[in-house]
Image (tube, rainbow, N blue to C red):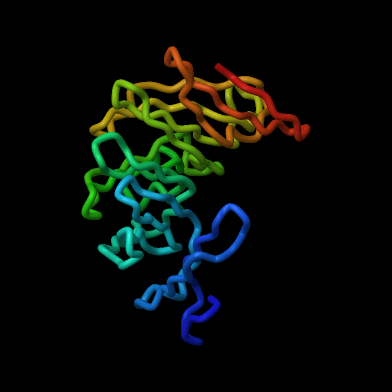
């Protein structure tokens, strides 16, 4: 918050490749006391920022264009800009907020003006720890997301990841459990050539590997 008013608790700073500050922008609206938990560059040269309570879009001059409130009891972990110029975010949510108990992994889509198009939760149960940590868009417009879960599968304790496929309208098309059994999280999804989907696994022993 360097060079910001004393009431400001968050600022956006831009650095060059050598670590020199190129710019500093203060969050001076009513949400300046919300923690920033995710930020991406947008195709128009602006920024999209997720705070504890809101999603904020800044233009290339770092002027606030719009702000949208997050759904209550939701936490955003990852955001992407989609091929249609919209934004998809994933994270976790209390499923009862959406009127169901289908799990705590969460996906939401906003248009380019910050209007919510749809939101979905998925997973196995309300009673376990579940959260989506990463999302990617496939060449056919569908989305894949990795949903971490603590649960029982076939009467055995499962601590690992489900990979969900969701279409552009927010409908869940399917899911599968990703190996290795006992992996703690799939921290990233990368779309490679020939349509391969690669997830980086952080296993319980601290090692990493790739799954295709």
Counting from the top left corner in percent of width and height, residue 90 is at 42, 43
> Which residue is drawn at the image coordinates 65% and 34% (left, top)?
184
Task: Say which of 138 and 43 sits in front.
Answer: 43
Q: Which residue appears at 51% of the width and 77% of the height?
A: 9
Q: Quadrant of the C terminus?
A: top right
Q: Is residue 169 visible?
A: yes
* Residue furthest out toward the bottom: 6
Residue 210, given in percent of the width and then of the height, sits at 62, 22
Question: Taking 11 as reference, is 143 above or below it?
Answer: above
Q: Is residue 211 left or right of residue 135?
A: right
Task: Count every numbered label the image shows and give the total.
Answer: 0
Residue sitting farthest toward the top? 194
Q: Residue at x 31, y 67 (%)?
A: 63
Image spot of residue 98 (x, y percent)? 32, 48
Q: Residue at x 41, y 28 (%)?
A: 144
Tell me if residue 100 can be seen.
no
Image position of 25 with respect to 195: above or below: below
Q: Quadrant of residue 105?
A: top left
Q: Is residue 185 left or right of residue 56?
A: right
Q: 154 or 212, which is in the foreground?
A: 212
- Residue 165: where, in percent of width, then height? 38, 25
In the image, residue 74 above or below residue 150 = below
In this picture, residue 109 sits left or right of residue 77: left
Q: Quadrant of residue 194?
A: top left
Q: Which residue is the extreme one toward the right? A: 205
């Amino acid at each position: 918050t360097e060079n910001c008013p004393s009431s400001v608790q968050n600022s956006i700073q831009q650095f060059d490749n050598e670590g020199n500050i190129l710019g500093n922008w203060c969050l001076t609206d009513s949400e300046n006391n919300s923690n920033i938990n995710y930020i991406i560059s947008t195709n128009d040269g602006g920024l999209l920022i997720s705070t504890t309570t809101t999603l904020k879009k800044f233009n290339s001059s770092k002027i606030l264009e719009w702000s949208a409130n997050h759904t209550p009891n939701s936490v955003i972990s990852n955001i992407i800009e989609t091929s249609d110029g919209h934004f998809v975010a994933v994270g976790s949510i209390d499923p009862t907020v959406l009127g169901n108990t289908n799990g705590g992994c969460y996906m939401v889509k906003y248009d380019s003006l910050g209007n919510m198009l749809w939101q979905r939760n998925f997973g196995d149960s309300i009673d376990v720890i579940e959260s989506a940590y990463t999302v990617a868009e496939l060449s056919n417009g569908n989305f894949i997301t990795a949903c971490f879960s603590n649960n029982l599968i076939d009467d055995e304790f499962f601590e690992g990841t489900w990979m969900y496929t969701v279409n552009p309208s927010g409908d869940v098309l399917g899911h599968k459990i990703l190996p290795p059994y006992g992996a703690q999280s799939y921290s990233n999804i990368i779309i490679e050539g020939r349509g391969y989907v690669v997830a980086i696994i952080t296993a319980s022993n601290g090692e990493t590997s790739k799954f295709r």
